Amino acid sequence: MVIDRCVDRKMSTSRIESTSLVFANIKSRLHQAISQLKHIPNVESITPVTGRFDLVIKLKTNDPEKAFHAIEKIREIEDITATQTALSLHQMSNASEEEREQPIAFALMEVKGALSETLRKLKTFPNCVEAHVIPGEFDGVAAFRGHSPKDVLENSVEKIGSINGVTASETLIAWNPTISESRP
């Protein structure tokens, strides 16, 4: 998903469009849960990941009521045991319309200091697709793509610690990108 279209690869940020990310845990029947998620309005993408969460679900809406209804529908799925929702307060995107592809890694970050500076620095990472400032346990989340998880880890995710103000990070790797689903 592209939050803002980048023109001539210049940094683009926006407060107009909004994205919600739902981090979910599944007790069993992952494929069945994904199938049900595909039918929920405003679900843009579903990515199975490793780590403390089983899925990263991206909602595309700037309407809080639509996001709330989508999250309610997600929580009604029997196999989803827990969710954590992060509403993007500020975001940046590096991808043009032609470059959109499913991320293969997500980095959750705790940041002390200027969040806009963290976004600016993430913009320089070669594999960073988009990044969001979010409220809650983490201050930011960034999505990365690349030829392989190793490529993303070595060329981008490992460099997050070098960003001034990032005090902690946690990486979620897409474990089966062929299961990942994006909706047009």
Image (cartoon, rainbow, N blue to C red):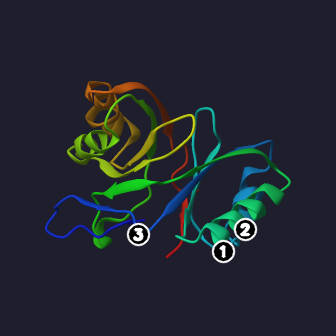
For the residue carrying disc 1, how many other residues have a C-alpha within 10 Å: few (<14), some (14-19), or many (20+)?
some
Q: Are marks 1 and 2 in contact (CB under 8 Å)?
A: yes
Q: SS class of the residue under badge 2?
A: helix
Q: Residue at x 51, y 52 (%)?
A: 177
The residue tagged 2 is 69
Q: CA distance from mark 1 to mark 2?
A: 9 Å
As shown in the figure, which amino acid type bears the numbered disc 3? Answer: Ile
Mark earlier in primary sequence (3, 2):
3
x then y, percent, for residue 15: 39, 63
Q: Residue at x 29, y 70 (%)?
A: 5
Q: In which quadrant is the N terminus drawn?
A: bottom left
> Closest to the observer: 52 or 141?
141
Q: Is residue 28 left or right of residue 125?
A: right
Image quarter of residue 76: bottom right
As shown in the figure, which amino acid type bears the numbered disc 2? Answer: His
Q: CA distance from mark 3 to mark 2?
A: 20 Å
x then y, percent, for residue 55: 62, 48
> Closest to the observer: 46 or 170?
170
Q: Residue at x 76, y 61 (%)?
A: 72
- Work out whether 89 lies above or below 164: below
The residue tagged 1 is 41
Q: SS class of the residue under badge 1?
A: loop
